[in-house]
Image (cartoon, rainbow, N blue to C red):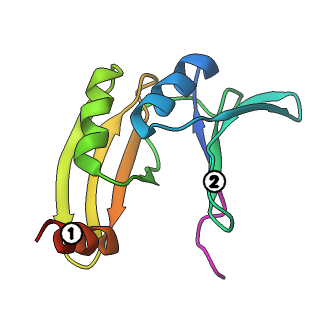
C-alpha cells in the first residue's frame, strides 16, 4: 500500500460556506462538482497527491466527534491566523513533533475538528533559509 489514505470527505451542511472557509484558510481554490447526485467541493493537489472533498449527504454529519483528517499546509502558524479570520476556532495550537513536523487542530464552521500539518522537511528548509 503506497498511502494509507486515498480519499477523504469532510461533512458540511452548507457546501459553499464551507468551501469559502477552506479556500481562505489554505489560500487555494476548491472545484465544485456533482458526483452521483451529491455536490462536492474538491481540494486541488499536485500529481500523485491525495485529495478529498467537502460533501453534504447522509449518513455523514458535521461535528466535533469522530476521526480527524490532517491537511497539509506550508505554514501552520499562518494557516491558524487565517482560520481565525475566516470564523473558525483553534482547538490545539501549533505544536512541534520531532521527526513529524508541526501540527495543530482547528474547528471549522460546521464544528468539524480538522488537523493542520507542515511536514518536518519544510521545517528544515525554513530553518536553513532563515539562517
Q: Nearer the viewer, residue 63 or 6?
A: 6
Element type where label 1 sits in the image: helix
Q: Residue furthest right?
A: 36
Q: Is residue 4 magenta?
A: yes
Which residue is labeled 1 in the image? 129
Quarter of the figure with the N terminus: bottom right
Residue picked out by circle 2: 51
Q: Residue at x 31, y 31 (%)?
A: 82
Residue at point 63%, 47% (across, down) = 44
Whole-percent x and y of residue 9? 62, 43
Asked if 40 appears above or below 98 in the picture, the reply is above
| 3D distance between C-alphas at marks 1 and 2 | 29 Å
Residue drawn at point x = 43 percent, y = 50 percent: 68
Q: Main secondary structure of the magenta part?
A: loop
Asked which quadrant contains residue 63, the reply is: top left
Residue 46 rendering spot, x and y as whole percentages: 63, 60
The residue stretch that appears in magenta: 1-7
Q: Is residue 18 left or right of residue 93?
A: right
Quadrant placement of the C terminus = bottom left
- Is residue 18 magenta-colored? no
Residue 102 sits in quarter = bottom left
The picture places residue 70, in percent across and down from the top left corner, at: 43, 54
Amino acid at each position: 500500500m503506497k498511502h494509507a489514505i486515498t480519499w477523504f470527505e469532510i461533512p458540511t451542511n452548507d457546501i459553499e460556506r464551507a468551501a469559502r472557509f477552506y479556500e481562505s484558510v489554505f489560500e487555494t481554490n476548491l472545484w465544485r462538482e456533482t458526483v452521483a447526485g451529491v455536490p462536492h467541493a474538491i481540494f486541488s493537489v499536485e500529481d500523485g497527491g491525495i485529495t478529498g472533498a467537502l460533501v453534504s449527504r447522509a449518513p455523514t454529519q458535521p461535528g466535533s466527534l469522530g476521526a480527524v483528517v490532517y491537511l497539509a499546509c506550508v505554514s501552520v502558524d499562518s494557516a491558524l491566523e487565517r482560520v481565525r479570520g475566516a470564523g473558525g476556532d483553534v482547538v490545539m495550537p501549533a505544536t512541534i513533533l520531532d521527526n513529524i513536523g508541526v501540527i495543530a487542530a482547528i474547528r471549522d464552521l460546521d464544528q468539524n475538528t480538522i488537523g493542520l500539518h507542515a511536514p518536518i522537511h519544510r521545517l528544515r528548509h525554513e530553518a536553513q533559509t532563515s539562517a
